[in-house]
Amino acid sequence: MREEHSDIVVIGSGFGGSVVAARLAEAGLGVTLLERGPWRDTVPVRSMGITQRSPLPRGGQLFTRLLRGIGSNRLPGGRIGLSKHGLFELFFGDGATIACSSGVGGGSHVYSAVNIRPLAENFWEGHASGVSDASMSAHYEAVLTRMGSVTPMADHRIPNSSSVRFKNTPALEPAAPPPDPRIGYLLPEDPDHPREVVDANGVARMEVDYKANEDGFLGSPGGGKTTLDVVYLAPALKSGLKVRALAEVETIAPVAGNAQARYRITWLNHATGERTAMLAQHVVLAAGTLNTLRILLRSRAEAGLTGMPQLGRRFGTNGDYFGYWDFNDPNVDQSTGLPTTGGVRLKGDRHSPMIGGGGLPSVDRYPLPRWVKNRMKRAYMIAGLGEDTLNGEVTFAKGRLKVCYDPEKSPIFARLRATFDAISRRSGHRIYAPKTPITVHPLGGACLGETIAEGVVDANGEVFDHPGLYVTDAAALPRSPGGPPSMTIAAWANHVASRFIARHGARS
Ligand SMILES: Cc1cc2nc3c(=O)[nH]c(=O)nc-3n(C[C@H](O)[C@H](O)[C@H](O)COP(=O)(O)OP(=O)(O)OC[C@H]3O[C@@H](n4cnc5c(N)ncnc54)[C@H](O)[C@@H]3O)c2cc1C
């Protein structure tokens, strides 16, 4: 097997991975980022000069590029691969279905770009000495600023925004926004004429086009949505960051008696089919909760990465509950506007859990009969969320990952089900929601803690019993933020990067 070396290896390029990789590379440190998915074919990535790009799922490639693979507690072998260029991965666990994404930039391509701080009060208090709401505050500000997060305006020119859409309906009203609401889009100065903008790094982006709504959960081909490849990786490449796309990490093994390397990472190159070993002094795991836990648990079972007694415990779903709201009103085309429409609630329900959603993006480009497309244009993907109890457990046996979670142990699900039922009844438009909740916010399982008896990583993000191994993605979160978590993950990664640079020094 071919062997390479990098001082620091970051695994995964989502909010946890891109932030830490960019910060460390910009501090002059030698960083290689391994990402299992491809670079996406977007206006900004083209302008960055990346030649190997993969189209987002659209038109004839909607179905072939949609799914990377499917996993389940019950599938023989645990999972099946569908397309290494696929945008989403689905995992059917007991009590939770998990959706996550694949590609350079991770979840930032598919997310709705609602960028907020935790809704759960005192989120960072009481987990580990040296980490508190006060100490994390500057990290939130840093990532919100770098993500170019803007405060959404109640603009009557944006079709379908909640403030307009639900203003005069009999049963519903726009929900009050969360504190300091921000979104990550390049909004158009003139909505009728979106234009190309080139940033300070020479990266080109198209402003959001409200009429086309191309910037939803199937990616943002023009770059109207602010993604991590543009904001974090493009400048970091200039600082020497090496990004390997289509590089899927399988295991991490400890190395003994080598002054240059503490870990041996085995990864599969999906472009060539070749397996390579990468020796590293520091390894940062940020493959997204499901895959970070898969790599750690598999490495413990097969590669001698012993210990980590709390690994896989306290897995949660952020109380996510999704439904398909079948409006079917011929006067409505919900496929236009921003993917983030804002919140909605029953009239006067001031204690409503957080509920929002939006139309399906780019419906006109789906290869489906016109009547199906018309019906989909009138529908609304409705989502509720709130703090859950992290009662889940993720385990690995006989080469297979297993997720067990009981939504009945978290009161948030009963509240959301009741609210969806009431919205269906009182709006006269039915919401279809699956019995097993779908989460796009899996978290925990390698949680921050004060000691090895309480968590997997310490206040530096370092695994208690494996110096030089770090977790910076949602797997490290000790609690559900109760609202969209990406800025919390990015802030945690920023905190770990700052601590790393303070302890190990920056090179210039
Ligand atoms: C439809 C949708 C809408 C959302 N909307 C919002 C929102 O509005 N606001 C918000 O805050 N959050 C939102 N989210 C959630 C957000 O996307 C996730 O919480 C976030 O991306 C998680 O960050 P992460 O760093 O933990 O992992 P990810 O962003 O998932 O990144 C993990 C990366 O690691 C890669 N990887 C996985 N396994 C391996 C491996 N073995 N080797 C190498 N690389 C690997 C993956 O391909 C991926 O690129 C949304 C999610 C979805 C699906």
Image: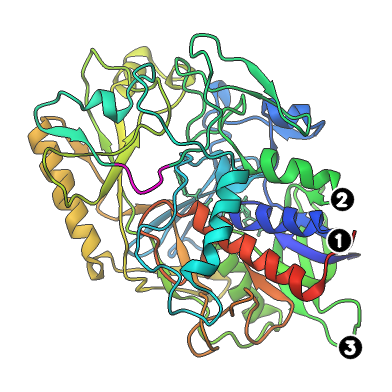
Of callouts 1 and 3, the N-terminal one: 1
Q: Nearer the viewer, residue 403 or 322?
A: 322
Against 400, residue 421 (above or below) is above
Residue 149, x across and y down, in percent: 53, 40
Q: Nearer the viewer, residue 110 or 182?
A: 182
Which amino acid, by three-letter code, is at mark 2?
Answer: Gly
Q: Alpha carbon of mark 1 to alpha carbon of mark 3: how far?
A: 22 Å
> Magenta residues: mostly which secondary structure?
loop
**416 horizontally vs 216: left or right:** left
Q: Alpha carbon of mark 2 to alpha carbon of mark 1: how far?
A: 7 Å
**234 horizontally vs 483: left or right:** right
Q: Residues within 10 Å of mark 1 (few under 14, many from 20)?
A: some
Q: Residues within 10 Å of mark 2 (few under 14, many from 20)?
A: some
- Contact (CB < 8 A) between labels 2 and 1? yes
Q: Which residue is mark 1?
A: 30
Which amino acid, by three-letter code, is at mark 1?
Answer: Gly
Q: Which residue is mark 3?
A: 257
Residue 136, x across and y down, in percent: 53, 65
- Callout 1: helix, strand or loop? loop
Q: Which residue is mark 2?
A: 240
Q: Tell me the magenta residue range.
A: 177-181
Q: Residues within 10 Å of mark 3 (few under 14, many from 20)?
A: few
Residue 131, x across and y down, in percent: 53, 74
Q: Residue at x 11, y 43 (%)?
A: 422
